[in-house]
Image: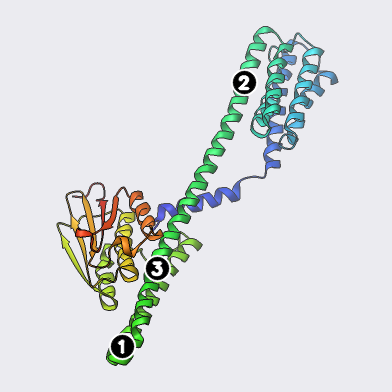
Amino acid sequence: MPGPDAHTRERLRAWARRRTPPPLAVDAAIVLAVLIGQSVPFLFTQRLAGPQAWTVAEYLPVLGASLPLILRRRYPLAVLMTVLASSYAYALNDPDIPEQPIWYGWLVATYTVATLSPPWKRALALCLGVSGALSASFTTFVRGALTTLAAYALGRSAVQNRAYLELARERAAAHERTRIARDMHDVLAHGVSVMIVQAEAGPVALRTAPEKAEAAFEAIGEAGREAQAQLRRILGLMRSPDQPRDPAPGLARIPELVADVSRTGPAVRLVTSGHARPLAPDAEVAAYRVVQETLTNVLKHAEATAVEVRLDWAHDELVISVSDDGTGAARSRPEPGHGLLGLRERVAACGGTARFGPGPGGRGFRAQVRLPAADGAP
């Protein structure tokens, strides 16, 4: 169950989503910052050089290299070309001034094209941006070319970073869907199998041993209630992952699971050896699901009369073995089932291994799973 840290992180993410300003407001702030950044240095330069003020021909290019950025997301290349044309006009109007040309709008427009435009437009923008620096001195050209390349590289890096984050989100969502599907399969398969076994045994018990029929119907109800409770937990997790919910089943519930199957199907013996050690939460759930799925397969396929479940604690791992005296793997399961495939994936995700196959002499079915103990366990 997620702790307070997970809840806090989710609340911070929600707060950040609510507080993120709309794109138009961001672009307006960028325009204002670029306009100030491109105007102030030259105003001070004019003041130091003498009393002569800027002319309209000098102000307009600065505005032309700033104001179009408000449309940069909608028309990236057109905005870049407008900004470059304004920069050319500024340089041509007074070629002696621009040792510090009006760069900032140019760089923002280049970054935008690099992030939003298709390859041919990006190539054109890069050529225009680098060649645009030729309108100034050699020193300014070198500086302009390097900063243009840097803005372009930064834009492409941002695109790749967003793509990586999107891929990570998609993989996380796929992993979560797979996990939920495994849980629902395990819960429903076990509950339905128990109910089917008891429903088939009920009519026979009514004819031959009426006193056992009541127990069969009680087992059907208990299996249904247990499946319902676990489904509610899973659905509650899907609706609101941070809300308190019942803990996932783990090692502590294996004896209860074994007892339930013993009442409704073949005799199941639980054997435990070694010194119990803590497991990671995912490994705890995996251990329970391993026993649950293998016992479900016994009820559905094996026609067994006896089952043994062993929990053997080694130095740094738990070895789970489930074996029965039923029909065996070859006859009971002509092809791998989704349940066993899901178990392999679940166990592998915990750093463990799983082996399934026939028992000794080819009789019965045997499952053996190894799960590592938690880091730092004594």
* Secondary structure of residue under mark 3: helix
Q: Are marks 3 and 1 in contact (CB under 8 Å)?
A: no
Hey, which residue is sitting farthest left in the picture? 274
Q: Amino acid at mark 1?
A: Ala
Camera-side residue of 340 and 50: 340
Mark 1 Cα-neighbour bin, 10 Å: few <14, some 14–19, many ≥20 = some
In the image, what residue type sits under mark 3?
Ala
Q: Secondary structure at mark 2?
A: helix
Residue 189's label in the rendered image is 3
In this view, the residue in front, 354 or 144, is 354
The quarter of the displayed image where residue 87 is located: top right
Front position among marks 3 and 1: 1
Identify which residue is drawn at 31% across, 63% down: 294
Residue 149: give its label: 2
Residue at image location 35% in from the left, 75% down from the top: 194
Residue 252, horizontal then vertical, whole percent: 26, 65
Q: Can residue 102 be seen in the rendering of this structure?
A: no
Query: What percent of the width, then of the height, locates residue 275?
Result: 15, 56
Q: Earlier in the sequence, mark 3 or mark 1?
A: 3
The label shown at residue 26 is none
Which one is nearer the viewer's eye here, 34 or 285? Answer: 285
Q: Which residue is mark 1?
A: 205
Give residue 3's quadrant in the image: bottom left
In which quadrant will I find the N terminus? bottom left
Q: Earlier in the sequence, mark 1 or mark 2?
A: 2
Viewed as shown, does residue 259 lie left or right of 114? left
Within 10 Å of disc 3 (Cα), the crowding (few <14, some 14-19, many 20+) is some
